[in-house]
Structures are given as C-alpha cells and as structure tokens.
Image (cartoon, helix red, strand yellow):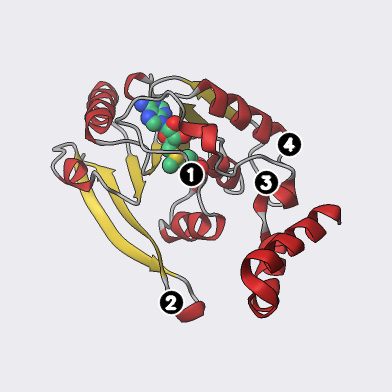
Amino acid sequence: MTDALARLRASLRKNGWWRTLTLIPRNILFHLTDFDRKYGTNTGMQAEDDAGLPQEHEGYEGAPPRLFHRIVRSLQIAPSRYAFIDLGSGKGKALLLASHHPFRRVIGVEYNARLNDIATENARLYQHPERKVANIETVCGDAGAYDLPAGDLLIYLFNPFKAAIMERVLANLENAIRTEPREVLVVYQNPTQRKLLDAAPFLEPVTYREYRTKRFRKMPIGRVAVYRSRT
Ligand SMILES: C[S@@+](CC[C@H](N)C(=O)[O-])C[C@H]1O[C@@H](n2cnc3c(N)ncnc32)[C@H](O)[C@@H]1O
C-alpha cells in the first residue's frame, strides 16, 4: 500500500493529475497480470542480468506466456514424444511455460550461472495448476558445447545469441543428428540469425510466421521460424 502511494505521488509529480488518471487502468491491468507477482517467481529483466557476459550473446528477456503457448499449440505435435530443450534458458521462464505441455523432458541450458541459479529456484517455486512436468532440468553451460540427450528433440531458441555462437550451436546440433538420426524440431523466436538456419543443410524450413495480438488492433508481437531435421 505504501509502495502504491509512493508510486502515485511520483506519477503525480512527473505526469500531473490528468495523465496519472488515464494511466491507472493500465497499471491495474499490469499489476493483475504480472507473471512474477502471480507465481512468486523471478523472471523479469534486471539491469545486472547481462553484466560481464560475452558480446556475441543477446541480452536476457523471458518468453511471453500467451505467445509461447500459441507457438507450441501451432506445432500440432504430441509433446510426449519430444524432449524440450531451451538453449539460452535465462531465468527459466520458457521452461516453466513448457512444463504445461507433457514433454518427455524439459531442459534448459544457460551460460550465465546467476541466471541459471534463479531458473532452478523458479522451477521449484512455480506452482501452476496446468503444470504437467514436475522435473525441470537446468544446466549451466555453453549451448554450443552441450551434449544433447537421445531421442526426438524440440529445440527452442528465443533470440539467445548472435552469429558466432549460433554457428557453434548449429555444428553441435548437426553432429548430434548425424550420430543419432531422429526428429528434431527447431523453434526459433525472433530469429535474427535466420539466414544461418536457412542455409543449414541438415535442416528444412517448416514455417515462418509473424504473430499478432488477437485483440488490441492486431499488433505484431513476434516472429517465429520453425525447422525440422532432414531425414
Ligand atoms: C533472450 S534470453 C531467453 C531466455 C529464455 N529462453 C526464455 O525464453 O525465457 C537469452 C539467454 O541466452 C543466454 N545465452 C547467451 N549465450 C549463451 C550461450 N553461449 N550458452 C547458453 N546460454 C546463452 C543469455 O544469457 C540469456 O539468458
């Protein structure tokens, strides 16, 4: 309550009465739908999240829940066939969301030890009635050197790295598929390095789609490219 009053005073000082009044409904909506407030987790962006990390990696940002579920549903797959692997899993938000779908395994690989510890704690804290996968596995390490597990895989990438790391990640994936041919789906959200995946001989493009909000003037909310391993 004191916190709300302090924010109200700050807004009055900065924006004046009229603007503050018009901002109230938006702030109430934000408050009611805030993921971390609802689930007691810590998945939001903080200034210190990217401190001291290699330049080739993209900054931390957690997966947006509605869009994430829309993407998974659009794949029309039987999740139990696949291990879901988030390469660049940050604080584990996509892992928490993936646990709503009955994947064979849910695994995150994150380079930044601090973010990975937060992901492990988030996996423990997250109690959602839709959660179907109890065991979320969090691995601290480089996505380009990760020893991928056996069986069919759904690799999820939410704009985690720039070209240099992506090239290593693709070489690692190609090696895993050659060692054990199987179905691998790659779901690449905000695909800034899409050209590299388009050119990968062991992958075939399945779809490329721009997602928009269903309401609110159909605003663009993300682009997703999906690939499948060539057989
Ligand atoms: C945009 S965030 C995505 C977070 C998560 N996938 C989600 O959707 O909630 C990208 C993450 O990739 C991580 N990352 C960057 N380079 C990496 C690497 N070489 N190996 C593993 N993780 C890396 C960053 O630290 C960051 O946390």
* Nearest to N terminus: mark 2 or mark 4: 4
Return the residue found at the far front: 13
User: Helix, strand or loop at disc 2?
Assistant: helix
Q: Rounded to the nearest whole Å, what is the CA distance between mark 4 and mark 3?
A: 12 Å
Q: Rounded to the nearest whole Å, what is the CA distance between mark 1 and mark 3?
A: 22 Å
- Nearer-the-camera pick, 137 or 157: 157
* Disc 3 target residue: 131
Q: Nearer the viewer, mark 1 or mark 2?
A: 1
- Nearer-the-camera pick, 199 or 222: 222
User: Helix, strand or loop at disc 3?
Assistant: loop
Q: Are marks 4 and 3 in contact (CB under 8 Å)?
A: no
Ligand 1: does it lie within 8 Å of the C-beta at label 1? yes
Ligand 1: does it lie within 8 Å of the C-beta at label 4? no
In the rendered structure, find residue 125 and report the number of the disc placed on it: 4
User: Helix, strand or loop at disc 1?
Assistant: loop
Ligand 1: does it lie within 8 Å of the C-beta at label 2? no
Q: Position of residue 154 (x, y in %)?
A: 40, 40
* Nearest to N terminus: mark 4 or mark 3: 4
- Nearer-the-camera pick, 81 or 60: 60
* Disc 2 target residue: 218
Q: Nearer the viewer, mark 2 or mark 3?
A: 2
Decide if residue 135 is on the left or right side of residue 57: right
In the rendered structure, find residue 61 and report the number of the disc placed on it: 1
The amino acid beneath tag 3 is Arg
Q: Position of residue 99 (x, y in %)?
A: 60, 43
* Nearest to N terminus: mark 2 or mark 3: 3
| Figure quadrant, ligand 1 | top left
* Nearest to N terminus: mark 1 or mark 2: 1
The amino acid beneath tag 2 is Lys
Task: Report crowding for label 1: few under 14, some 14 to 19, many 20 or more residues within 10 A (C-alpha).
Answer: some
